[in-house]
């Protein structure tokens, strides 16, 4: 059976989030019936509404490094498969009214069309580019003014159940035609979040939280039209453009509004609070526009995906050629997904198969490796130049760091071990690049001790590369705590060979990762872990094979090391 849009949205959205939620979804959707829209609207909804509380997996992600060089983690809560699918249903039902209602000052988490299988929300880059254009227009209208960046402290963990519920109720009241069931489900999701946080807030991690956060700040977005300074918002980052007194006045009104919601912005002395002249800011106007690298990269990834879809039997040959040329691309196996897809049967029946084959003509192995080599050489030259001229002034530094992250993320898949080793020391000297420095060191040395200590998002980025390069991950001196435990499980679930002392297998997550999954494990575990084990079923672990196979032909190639491309709030 061809998967419903709900299931494809959920799979793509949570694959880019964390593998634990993704694998649970894949096992849940293994049966034909569970893939259907009818199943989501009836069974999954009833499971969520009928459960006394939600089931979440708490994953620790790398956030940043503080002034004392201590690693800060972000708690990410991944919902059960039923709740993830219900999120897709609820957000989709809200899309029409919200897209007509949202403020033009908002540039984040645009809800995707119901037919868009890539996720619940549109790709974030479009929002970043639109925000950049809006700030540029404001700067040109006020050339002798200033640009000020402010950031809301601990945004999601500070949104209380009361504030979230009030925002949801108001949206439902004003939407008119929204189904009563959708309102009930939304309230239930908010209540589930509150129970998980001991009635403190909504959760960070579930996709529904992004929508609720936009609803909470929607009155502020509307009020911004009356502010003397130009107001632009991207998630919890607010940009003000105007004369100093206009910005001061606007900031005072924003702080008062946020305070009434229990929200607060970072102090003026914080590094996230930046003031720069409008004239100088305009030098950054085109920072998010494509300089040729983005289009070239997307053509490369699309060519790989087309080859995997149209020539699935050639996957081992493509994999071997990429490895031979020093590339570490993780390849999805689309063969089974294509065989099950009724869409591809319709294409064949309509006689469009030959036409599509011709369109995929540039997706041969020789052209793929040539294109990858050209991109690698260009990005290496650009990165070397940027690293040699990294400024200290905070605004310019953040601009250049974003460009560095963009290039390092892609070169982790493209560059030779020797070349990465040649830049490792430079990257290591830049505190803001701790995520990338750890990835590079693991590739160069095969030692993942640092990687697994940083968080599951870093571990997954490295594990995906190790899987593609067929290398063994070593952790000789790892200190095994809760974060490291998840990191080791991540490598194992990706099918990466490990060389190190695996801690006590009484840990349920590690037992699931390693297999064999047995009755004592099913009966002894609780919550999300128990659900993951039950959905997987008894027997040897099949996580690695699941990670390698595509859910459906629409599943995108996810490259985990690119997650911090634009890791700054400007």
Image: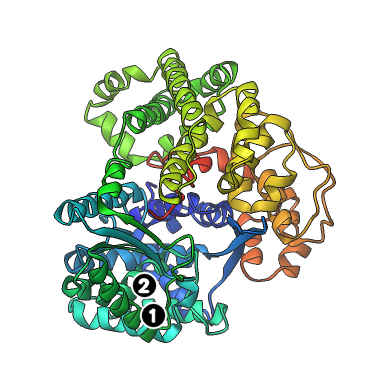
Residue 156 on image: x %, y %? 46, 71
- Give neighbour class at mark 1: few <14, some 14-19, many 20+ (Cα, 10 Å): many
- For mark 2, does the 10 Å Cα neighbourhood hold few (<14), some (14 to 19), or many (20 or more) residues? many
Q: Check the image and report above or below for 256 versus 285.
A: below
Residue 550 in view: no
In this orientation, which residue lies closer to the viewer: 203 or 361?
203
Q: Is residue 502 left or right of residue 432?
A: right
Which numbered disc flags the more N-terminal residue, 2 or 1? 1
* Disc 2/disc 1 C-alpha distance (Å): 6 Å
Residue 305 placed where, x, y %?
A: 41, 30
Residue at x 45% of width, y 51% of height: 394
Image coordinates of residue 468 in percent, x first then y, are 60, 31
Quadrant of residue 91 within the rendered picture: bottom left
Which residue is outermost to the left? 141
Task: Give the labeled residue for mark 2.
Answer: 212
Q: Nearer the viewer, residue 122 or 358?
A: 122
Q: SS at mark 2?
A: helix
Check disc 1 and report the residue beneath it.
164
Q: Residue furthest top?
A: 366
The mark total stands at: 2
């Amino acid at each position: 059976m061809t998967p419903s849009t709900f299931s494809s949205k959920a799979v793509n959205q949570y694959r880019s989030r964390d593998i634990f939620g993704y694998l649970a979804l894949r096992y849940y959707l293994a049966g034909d019936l569970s893939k259907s829209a009818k199943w989501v609207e009836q069974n999954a909804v009833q499971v969520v509404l009928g459960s006394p509380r939600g089931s979440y997996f708490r994953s620790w992600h790398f956030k940043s490094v503080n002034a004392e060089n201590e690693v800060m983690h972000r708690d990410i809560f991944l919902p059960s498969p039923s709740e993830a699918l219900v999120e897709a249903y609820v957000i989709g039902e809200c899309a029409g009214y919200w897209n007509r209602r949202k403020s033009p000052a908002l540039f984040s988490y645009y809800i995707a069309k119901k037919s868009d299988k890539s996720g619940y929300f549109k790709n974030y880059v479009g929002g970043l580019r639109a925000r950049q254009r809006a700030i540029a227009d404001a700067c040109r209208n006020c050339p002798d003014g200033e640009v000020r960046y402010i950031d809301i402290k601990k945004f999601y963990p500070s949104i209380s159940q009361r504030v979230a519920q009030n925002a949801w109720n108001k949206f439902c009241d004003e939407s008119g035609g929204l189904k009563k069931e959708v309102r009930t489900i939304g309230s239930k999701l908010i209540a589930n979040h509150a129970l998980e946080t001991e009635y403190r807030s909504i959760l960070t991690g579930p996709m529904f939280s992004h929508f609720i956060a936009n609803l909470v700040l929607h009155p502020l977005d509307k009020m911004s039209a009356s502010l003397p300074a130009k107001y632009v918002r991207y998630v919890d980052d607010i940009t003000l453009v105007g004369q100093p007194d206009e910005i001061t006045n606007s900031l005072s009104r924003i702080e008062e509004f946020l305070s009434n919601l229990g929200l607060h912005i970072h102090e003026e002395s914080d590094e996230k609070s930046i003031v720069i002249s409008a004239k100088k800011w305009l030098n950054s106007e085109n920072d998010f526009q494509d300089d040729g690298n983005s289009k070239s990269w997307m053509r490369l990834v699309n060519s790989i995906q087309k080859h995997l879809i149209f020539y699935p039997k050639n996957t081992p040959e493509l994999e071997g050629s990429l490895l031979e040329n020093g590339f570490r691309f993780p390849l999805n196996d689309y063969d089974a997904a294509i065989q099950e897809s009724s869409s591809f049967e319709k294409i064949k029946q309509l006689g469009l198969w030959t036409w599509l084959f011709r369109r995929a003509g540039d997706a041969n192995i020789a052209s793929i490796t040539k294109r990858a080599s050209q991109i690698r050489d260009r990005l290496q030259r650009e990165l070397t130049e940027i690293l040699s001229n990294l400024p200290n002034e905070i605004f310019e530094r953040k601009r250049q760091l974003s460009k560095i992250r963009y290039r390092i993320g892609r070169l982790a898949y493209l560059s030779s071990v020797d070349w990465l080793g040649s830049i490792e020391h430079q990257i290591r000297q830049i505190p803001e690049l701790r995520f990338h420095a750890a990835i590079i060191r693991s590739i160069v040395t095969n030692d993942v001790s640092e990687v697994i200590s940083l968080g599951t998002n870093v571990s997954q980025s490295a594990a995906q590369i190790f899987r593609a390069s067929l290398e063994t991950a070593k952790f000789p001196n790892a200190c095994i705590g809760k974060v490291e435990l998840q990191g080791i499980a991540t490598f194992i679930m990706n099918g990466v060979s490990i060389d190190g002392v695996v801690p006590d297998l009484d840990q349920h997550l590690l037992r699931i990762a390693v297999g064999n999954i047995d009755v004592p494990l099913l009966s002894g575990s609780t919550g999300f872990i128990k659900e993951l084990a039950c959905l997987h079923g008894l027997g040897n672990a099949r996580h690695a094979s699941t990670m390698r196979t595509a859910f459906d032909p629409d599943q995108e190639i996810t490259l985990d090391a690119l997650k911090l491309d634009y890791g700054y709030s400007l």
